[in-house]
Amino acid sequence: MTDTIAKTRTQTTFSIFDKIEQMGHEQITFCHDAKTGLKAIVGVHNTVLGPALGGTRMWTYASDEEALQDALRLSRGMTFKNAVAGLNLGGGKAVIIGDARTQKNEPLLRRYGKFIESLNGKYITAEDVGMSEADMEYIAMETKHVTGLNEKMGGAGDPSPYTALGTYMGIKAAAQQVFGNDSLAGKRVLVQGTGNVASHMIDMLAKENAEIIICDIFEDRLKAITDRHKVQVVGTDEIYDIEADVYAPCALGATVNDETLARLRTPIIAGCANNQLKDEKIHGDACLQRGIVYVPDFLINAGGVINVYSEYAKMPKEWVVRKTEALYDTCLEVIQRSANEQRNAQEVAIEIALERIDAIAHIKTVR
Ligand code: NAD
């Protein structure tokens, strides 16, 4: 019996360290507090460029392993996102295991804040799934290493307009590559999801006289758009079959997959949704093979984190706009490199992020 326990423990410990080594994390910290019921994991992937910034996700994970996997995967993604966006930030992400609707309360959030404080600024948190601006206020009672606060509390406010601006810039960069100029006037854009980000993006597309086709699962979301703009509304499944210039996924992840790629008739995929490619390798390659320009999600939707960074680095809104507009150049660089070298655009964007981390690591060692 004792042998079995020792063996299991050894195997588990080894698999965790193998995984961390494989993914290149610097530090994973676990926090448990019996009184508040807090169970949290903070993944610090890379701090070469600066402190590891990324949101906290509260979710009812089926197992501790699933929670750890999410912390590892998401924190690594933040390293690439922050680096490619040109921010002086490393990559981190945290998860709290639990039901955000029933288990989240002041003591738990403040205990979590103390936990973050104990990391001495190596990790800076923000909102993610299951967390709100109000939750950040409780966390801020115990640590200064928190962003995503209300504008009245010195926060940077809603990131959606900036995520929308960056996405719009990414679409224009793709148009430049495909059509030889970046005007979207008369271009047909399929917008999947008309939520916070997409509604701002649609305003920009409409201003440029793009032809806009939308879908959403909620009538009120659609109405908010049709009240403002002349757009065509289609069904949530129908959207994949419409011939257009751009498919902009702005709702769910994994919508670029075997089934949808067989149906999509657009030369560009560029939208704000996270994790658009069902499989980064398979479906990133598939876009390339089909001659579709895919703008990597973590790059095109970086306007939001640029806004969050401005809160931490105390930068003005003009800077946020300038930095977000500059995503156009990075998107174009990725798209062109991908086309010239016939390589998966997602991999090219990661490569550019790694090149920057490598270059700055070198500068930091120079005396
Ligand atoms: P949101 O919840 O406001 O909008 C999503 C919209 O998609 C909603 O209107 C929802 O009804 C709709 N939707 C859900 N399922 C759908 C379906 N099957 N077909 C069509 N529509 C569907 O979210 P958001 O803040 O606008 O974010 C959109 C996406 O962008 C998400 O993937 C999010 O992770 C990503 N993102 C957002 C930000 C930001 O600043 N908000 C930053 C980076 C990435």
Image: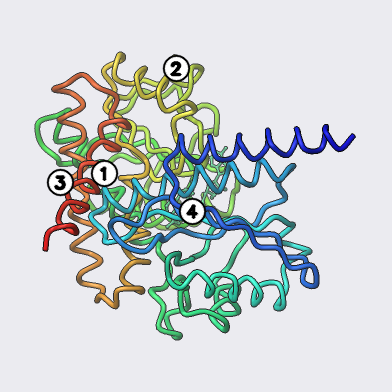
Residue on which disc 3 sits: 329
Residue 168 picture location, percent across and down: 28, 48
Q: How far is mark 1 from mark 4, CA to CA?
A: 20 Å
Residue 240 picture location, percent across and down: 46, 25
Residue 335 picture location, percent across and down: 20, 32
Residue type, label 4: Gln
Kindly give the residue lying farthest to the right in the view shown: 1
Q: Is residue 168 left or right of residue 235?
A: left
Image point 37% across, 33% down: which residue? 247
Secondary structure category for the residue under label 1:
helix
Residue 300 picture location, percent across and down: 31, 45
Residue on which disc 1 sits: 353
Residue type, label 2: Arg
Residue on which disc 2 sits: 263
Residue on which disc 4 sits: 27
In this view, the mark in front (2 or 3): 3
Q: Give the quadrant of the C terminus.
A: bottom left
